[in-house]
Image (cartoon, rainbow, N blue to C red):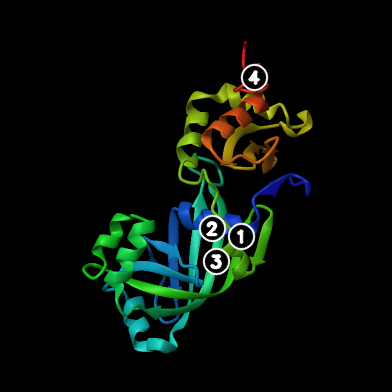
Amino acid sequence: MQTTTTTDIPAPTTAERVRTALIRADTTMLAVDGCDPISTTVHHLHDEGHVAIVVPSRSDAVDLAWRAGAAGLSAMLELTDHSPLRLRNPVRSLIWLSGTLRPVDEPRRLAAEIAEILPHPELLDVGHTTELLQLELTSVVAADTTGAESVELGAVLDAAPDPFAIYETAWLQHMEDDHADIVARIARRIPSTSRTGRIRPLGLDRYGLRLRIESGEGDHDVRIPFHEPVDDPTALSRALRMLIGCPFMNGLRSTH
C-alpha cells in the first residue's frame, strides 16, 4: 500500500497515535515466551509505564507469570486498529508494546482502581474467570502505511489520546452510509490526477480527515487537514463544514 504524505500537514504524533490505539484497538494479542499468543480484553496504561492486561485465568501466560514472580518474563502486546468499514486492507495501524510481564498481588483492588477510569465490564470477572497481569514497558513501536517508528516511553506517557477516539467508528460509518456526497465534496481537495479510484473515509481525528483511495493500481491514503486542530464536537462540526465549503461554515456567526 502507498500513502500520500506531506511533512507540513498537521497530524497526530506517534505518541498520540499510541495512546489512541490503547483506547480504540479492536484486536489485541499478548505474546509471552513459552506459550502461544492469547487474546486480551482490557489494556490500561498507568502513569508509571505499566500496562494492566486482562487475560483468561486459566491461560498459560498467567501460570508462567506467577512462576517467574518478581523477575518477570519477556512479553509483547500487539494492538491492531482496524477500519470500521469494509476496506480491501482494513488494518490502519499496528502497535507493539514490549517489556517485562509480572503478576499482580492484589488484582481485584487494581481492577477496581482501573474501573474508576475505564469502566470495562471485563474487570468484574477479575479473580473469577480472568486475571490481571502487568507489562512494564521497555519499548513502543507504531506502524501504519507510512512505515514503522519507535517512540520514547516518556513521550507516550505525556501524550493524550484523540478526543474523538470513542466516537470515530460511528461517525465514519455514518459518513460512508449516509453522506457519500460529503465525502465526494471533501475529496475535491485531492488533486484530480490522484482521484482515480473509489474514495472512502478512513479516519478522523482532531487534526483532520483521512481518506482511502482504492484503485486498480493499489490503495493509497490522503490526509485532509482542518484549518486548525479541534477538541470538541462543535468545533469538529464547524471544521467539517469548512472542508465541504458550506455557506454557513462559521456556524456561530450572528445574522443580526
Which residue is label 3 attached to?
A: 96
Name the spot of residue 34 as percent of width and height, x first: 41, 82
Mark found first going from the N terminus, 4 or 3: 3
Residue 104 relative to residue 180: left or right = left
Q: Amino acid at mark 2?
A: Arg
What element does badge 2 sit on?
Answer: helix
The three-letter code of the residue at mark 3 reads Trp
How far apart are labels 2 and 3 at the CA level? 12 Å
Q: Secondary structure at mark 1?
A: helix
Instruction: Name the residue carrying label 2.
Output: 19
Q: Which residue is painted at 68% across and 43% down in the image?
A: 220
Residue drawn at 43 percent across, 63 percent down: 44
Q: Which residue is mark 1?
A: 15
Q: Which element carries disc 4, helix, strand or loop?
A: loop
Where residue 215 sits: x, y (%)?
66, 36
Tell me whether the residue at label 2 lies in contact with that at label 1, contact meaning CB atoms closer than 8 angstroms.
yes
Crowding at dot 2, Cα within 10 Å, few <14 / some 14-19 / many 20+, comes out as: many
The residue tagged 4 is 246
Dot 4 or dot 2, earlier in sequence: 2
Residue 195, image x and y in percent? 71, 31
